[in-house]
Amino acid sequence: MDRAAEAGRTPGVRAAARAASRRHSRRVRIMRILVPASGLVLLLVIAGMIGVSNYLSGLGLGTVSFTADGLVMDSPELSGNDGDRSYRVSAKRAIQRISDPRIIDLETITAELRLSADQSLDISAARGTYNSAEETLLLADGIDVVTNDGETATFGTLDIALKTGTIRSDDPVELTSSFGALRAGRMQFDQDNGTLTFTQGIQMTIQPPQSETTQ
């Protein structure tokens, strides 16, 4: 804008414009914090999901029965630790398919993972399908993740390729933290390229720091 136009503004208009500019600058700063924070939450989720899938092949078994659906294992569970890291993975039932024993269907999955001395997360999923031949894990019907810092992530589905570390969700995704929330219709993480991509109807809600909300 040229100086003549600026001079023609009333003091009230100029003050409002400066205030709007300050608010915009704050929003930009907050977005720069929120997006990496959301990415960090998702990276924790990814580490947890890959951990869960790696543990599935060694689940301890409860009662085992044979049905028309396959070999049914009640209350399979696995737990262990490695220094600061520990895990506990369980499911209500695990069903090894008759048609293809390499595929295991899981019901009501829960996992408690401690990734370091100060980082842990809880994961729950209504159902999952583990394919040992293709090295894939599909979680569906709602996946919830909560970190010890209060960050949360919600997914409709998660399709995890263990060989490549790629994680994709073609259903709505929502990430929340103290900085705000990020929602998208689809998401993909590419481990090889280190890229995290959100697409389709992206919405961001920003929660300003307390110091700014009181100004």
Image (cartoon, rainbow, N blue to C red):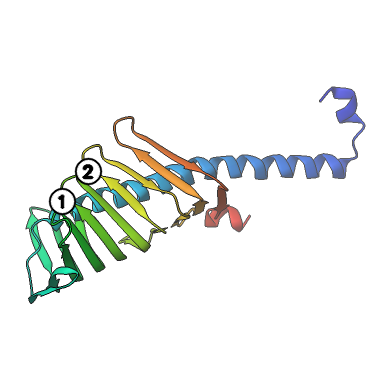
Hey, what amino acid is under mark 2? Leu
- The answer to whether 164 appears left or right of 149 in the picture is left
Q: CA distance from mark 1 to mark 2?
A: 8 Å
Decide which of 82, 159 is in the foreground and name it.
159
Decide which of 9, 135 is in the foreground and name it.
135
Which mark, residue 144?
none
- Sequence-wise first label, 1 or 2: 1
Q: Is residue 118 above or below residue 189?
A: below
Q: Position of residue 28 (x, y in %)?
A: 58, 40
- The answer to whether 101 appears left or right of 14 in the picture is left
Task: Name the residue rendered at 80%, 43% in the picture.
Answer: 15
Task: Name the residue rendered at 42%, 59% in the picture.
Answer: 156
Q: Position of residue 164 (x, y in %)?
A: 25, 37
Q: Secondary structure at mark 1?
A: helix
Q: Position of residue 122 (x, y in %)?
A: 27, 63
Q: Quadrant of the rendered structure where residue 114 is? A: bottom left
The quadrant in which the N terminus is found is top right
Q: Secondary structure at mark 2?
A: loop
Q: Which residue is mark 1?
A: 54
Q: Which residue is mark 2?
A: 162
Residue 121 visible to the viewer: no
Q: Position of residue 53 (x, y in %)?
A: 19, 53
Task: Name the residue rendered at 14%, 53% in the picture.
Answer: 102
Disc 2: CA contacts within 10 A as few (<14), some (14-19) or many (>=20): some
